[in-house]
Amino acid sequence: MHKIRIGSIVPGEAVEKFLPEFLKYGYECISFNFHMVFPEKDLAAFAERVKSAADGMPVEVSSIGYYCNPLENEEQLHTLEHFIDNANLFHTDLVTTFAGGLEGRPVEEAMPRYKAVFSELAKRAEHNGVRLAIENCPMGGTWQSAACNIGFNPKAWEMMFQEVDSPVIGLEWEPAHQMVQLIDPVPQLEQWISRIYHLHGKDATIDWNRVKKFGVFGAEEFALARTPGYGDTDWRDVFHVLYMHDFCGDLCVEGFHDPIFHGSLELAGQRHALNYLNWCRGIPG
């Protein structure tokens, strides 16, 4: 049985602060993420920063992520292409991103543009031996008024994979982004496992009393992002699905969201997540 590696996500702008700590804790791999802006000269320069921050410790890179809107922003599209072309610098074949969107417009209206952009990105990825994994985050958007990522809902996934039928395009999945849509995550994981290439370790707690009192249109927040081990998901169920389907990817904790374990408690939350997920995995680290 393949041991699913447990890693953590390091924001690219904070690599010196967090990478050494995460490596000391025993995380087995690292994902490096940038959101909308890539402030480095290029990925070669960033790779040097990673090497310096690691200070001789080995770094197993699960993925490099650039979360952007390649459907509407040409500069961001070119940066995403740069990530695809240079993923090999980090000895990973996985680039994670958003599907993009036509902001403020329904998901369906973005599909022709998605097909045009991601057909070319798929060709580029295939040429470089790279896979693209689209995160399932709504980014505050809805079906009728999408934000910068249409790839947040299974109905959209069906349309996306029909428009661009390439095995190099899959999903980066986490339960929290589905729970905020009141979708039961574990059955969905089992249904879509063949197209899921990477997992984020982030959970959520649903406050059903708030749902019953205020509904789900934003008057009150009803789904709090949580560190694994403190949310509603039993991650033993997640690993059960992954093992039953011979999943060969990684699961990387996405911190910096928990309303309790943040700021001075961020590292405590990350250590707890690692211990909890190791227990759920059932295979020693």
Image: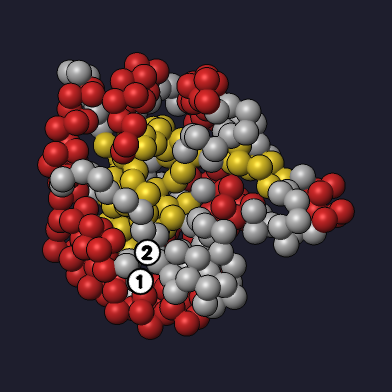
Q: From the image, which quarter does the C terminus lie in?
A: top left
Q: Is residue 144 left or right of residue 215?
A: left
| Badge 2 amino acid | Asn
Using the image, determine if residue 186 lies above or below residue 237.
below
Residue 201 numbered tag: none
Residue 72 numbered tag: 1
As rendered, which of 106 and 249 lies closer to the eye? 106
Using the image, determine if residue 252 lies above or below residue 272.
below
User: At numbered mark 2, what does the secondary structure look like: helix, strand or loop?
Assistant: loop
- The answer to whether the residues at label 2 and label 1 have Cβ atoms under 8 Å apart is yes
Q: CA distance from mark 2 to mark 1?
A: 6 Å
Tell me what residue is drawn at x 58 percent, y 34 percent. Answer: 258
Q: Which residue is mark 2?
A: 69
As rendered, which of 152 and 218 lies closer to the eye? 218
Q: Is residue 272 visible?
A: no
User: At numbered mark 1, what does the secondary structure look like: helix, strand or loop?
Assistant: loop
Tell me what residue is drawn at x 73 percent, y 49 percent. Answer: 222
Tell me what residue is drawn at x 36 percent, y 58 percent. Answer: 68
